[in-house]
Amino acid sequence: MRYRQKFRKALFFQVMLGIVAFCIAEANPGMLVLTGAIGWLSWFIAEGPHGKPTSKWLTHFASFVAVAWLFIDIFVLKNQIPIAMGHFTIWLQLILMYAQKTNREYGQLMVLSMLQIVGASVISVSMIYGLLLAVYSITTLVTVLLFQLKLTNDQIFDTNKKAAIDRNSVHRPKPIVSRGYKWHFRLTAISVGTVCAIVAIGTFVIIPRSDKADWAAKLAAINNAKQAGFSDVVDLSNGAPTMQSKDPVINLRITKNNKRVGSSNQHWLIRGAIQDKYEPHTKMWLRGRYPRTFDKNYYLFGNIKDFVAIGSNNEDRLVSDFTVRQTVLTNLFTLHPITRIESQHFERITFSALDQQVSNPESKSGVLMYTTTSPPNTSDRLAYAYAALRKTLVQQSDWDMHGDRNEDNLMSKYARGWRVQPERVSEFTQNILKEYGLSRDPEALYTPDDLLIAQTISDYLIHNYTYSLENPTVESQDPIISFLFDHRQGHCELFAAGFAAMCRSIGMQVRLVTGYRASDYNSLGGYYVVRMKNAHAWAEVRPGPLSGWITFDPTPPSEVAEEHAADTGVLGSLRQLYEHLEFLWIKSVVSYDANKHKQVMDRAKQSVENVKTENSWFVKVITFFKELPQNWRLERMHYTLAGIIIVLLFICIASLIRMAAAKRRRTQALQLTALPRVQRRTLLKRLRFYLHMLDLLERHGHSRPDWMSPARFAKELAEKNPEKFGIVIDLTEQFYEIRFGHRDFDAARKLSIKQQLKTLESALLGKIKTPATATSPG
């Protein structure tokens, strides 16, 4: 039966689509290729006309292997339970696809596939997966409806076999359906699917994503956490960092005076973590104990927190909108410096008045959206405001650091000094400065030339050292010393660390910063797309007691720009379009939480209230129709004509679509789909009488199944009632003569067929009896 074949194809497509969706959700291309190939081959090996399903003992053995692999996946490979269970369901489905299948196995395949798609929904928030999920839902609906038809047919067949004396003589029942059964089935599927979609959308709008139990978002961030290019420490013991993924991690929109700021020729450094301490034995830069003492929890009352007030013009400030996508890190990314943060995604943040590092103490994972405000420059007023905030914190707490409560004294030691071959590094740095007519006293905390000295050291590294990701790791020597004196090449972390070592060796205050370099500008959305591969490291220098920390990036800019360059050409444009659509997907769907739910409900309530006002569109429409008879004048006729034309165009388009669909159905019913278009058009006109005959018979309960030939259908009707349906055989013979015998459709034949149709209609109504046979014109 054709619908049985359609069910098998639909189920195969459903299972394969579920496997593909899970592999994409997990971002596992290797498993996608392996399982996809194994699943595809099952159609030719086990499902084809000469298919040979596997024996039961092999199916059971493979199932035990799948169970064993589940334990390996969880306890040896340390995969999360949803991912491991997804792998387990995939292997079970592949085993069943090769096995001998009854309705029980078909049902198990559908259930396993649906369980797997539920697991995939937990670990993925991508737009591609969302589209696959929509297609999967439609496919599953069709598969379930076809499965119901198959179950009914099998149930009738089994009942007939049990009741028959000779079971071998019982044949599977033939479904009797009208010629439009496909459209009936499609209409049912569309109706059920539409109702399900309306319920799903309504449920989504009414019930927001919870902001309390975020375990699903943590699971969804597993893969990104494994690949994250950003780190809150700089570990120089592992050599060069590997090339990271192009997956977006941040969308950044910057505005000034309510106008977007940014272009493909402009880049920004986004701070994530600050490292002020270098440990030679571990070869790591990290955040020391001293700045952590200034970490304070701030509650965002009204979703806003101002850290300091510097009195500058608000119109000159940069407003940065961050959308951090699927991260489990506590660090919040900002431009430098910041004075305000706004968010509806968390209630409190941790902020340090010393290094301005911001973090989320609640460690909320998933999509985070927040806005920061930055002054136009690192002014002295800002540095003074932060210094005053630090002193206030010291006075209000039991703060103590190495027995010294003098914050100014400890601040003078912050981010200074170098312990790895300090004399060698200091001499090396002083010799470089001497070439430019500069020098610095290592004992001095600040000098008037500190800003120029830092710029000179940065320029020296940029022009005399080579950017490379292939620098070797030397176990016996410190990597910074090796970079400065031996290899003279390295990645951004070594450039920033070498710069800090040189500046610190002559008494300057310098710290490292890790974050991202934002340069990939999406012109469609007006924001920067920050990818995992855009992770970067640089340094900040404090050139004076009341000066802000100044950013220096000593890595060669041309090489860094080339490495972080965005895709161009057609592929680049397509990537921009897709990523913009995915960004809208994340903002509208993925991050739909209680706050957005409240906004939607408030807008809906406001819209209902606005309906009652005189200026609302609803009232205007009602008023227009009320006053239509009075306002019907000649000068308004062009509006009326335009409306009539639009309605007529809509009716014409709908009619053309309906005519095309009806023509397609007629072509299929007359078996003309394989003919050329000209011949098909001619035969459609000539054979219209046969469709008229089928319609007459169908109205009286005699429908020709789609699988039955016209001759067999006419023969079976004539055998039931020769006097009533004998004329059907004659009309069918004329159908064959015109369709396959290329007989002329002259006036005599046309008149004869018309009379026969009237006779058949009268016979069906019981008015007359028809002869068993009729004579057709030669």
Image (cartoon, rainbow, N blue to C red):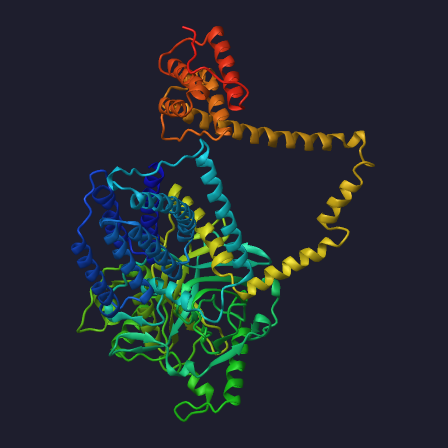
Q: Nearer the viewer, residue 546 or 172?
A: 172
Q: Position of residue 44 (x, y in %)?
A: 22, 41
- Horizontal and vertical percent for residue 381? 56, 74
The C terminus is located in which quarter? top left
Q: Is residue 168 left or right of residue 699?
A: left
Query: What residue is at 56 percent from the left and 75 percent from the top?
Result: 308
Q: Is residue 459 above or below residue 161?
A: below
Residue 473: x and y in percent read: 20, 67
Residue reaching furthest to the front = 165
> Residue 676 versus residue 370: which sits nearer the camera?
676
Image point 22% across, 49% down: which residue? 98
| Quadrant assignment, res 538 | bottom left
Drawn side of residue 6 relative to residue 658, left or right: left
Classify residue 572 as left or right of residue 760.
left
Depth check: give the residue in front, 659 or 762: 762
Q: Position of residue 509 (x, y in %)?
A: 39, 76
Quarter of the image that includes the N terminus? top left
Q: Is residue 714 visible?
A: yes
Q: Residue furthest right?
A: 630
Instruction: Tell me: residue 331, above or below residue 56.
Output: below
Q: Residue at x 35, y 48 (%)?
A: 14
| Residue 466 visible in rendering | no
The image quarter containing residue 626 is top right
Count of numbered circles in the view = 0
488 lies above or below 670: below
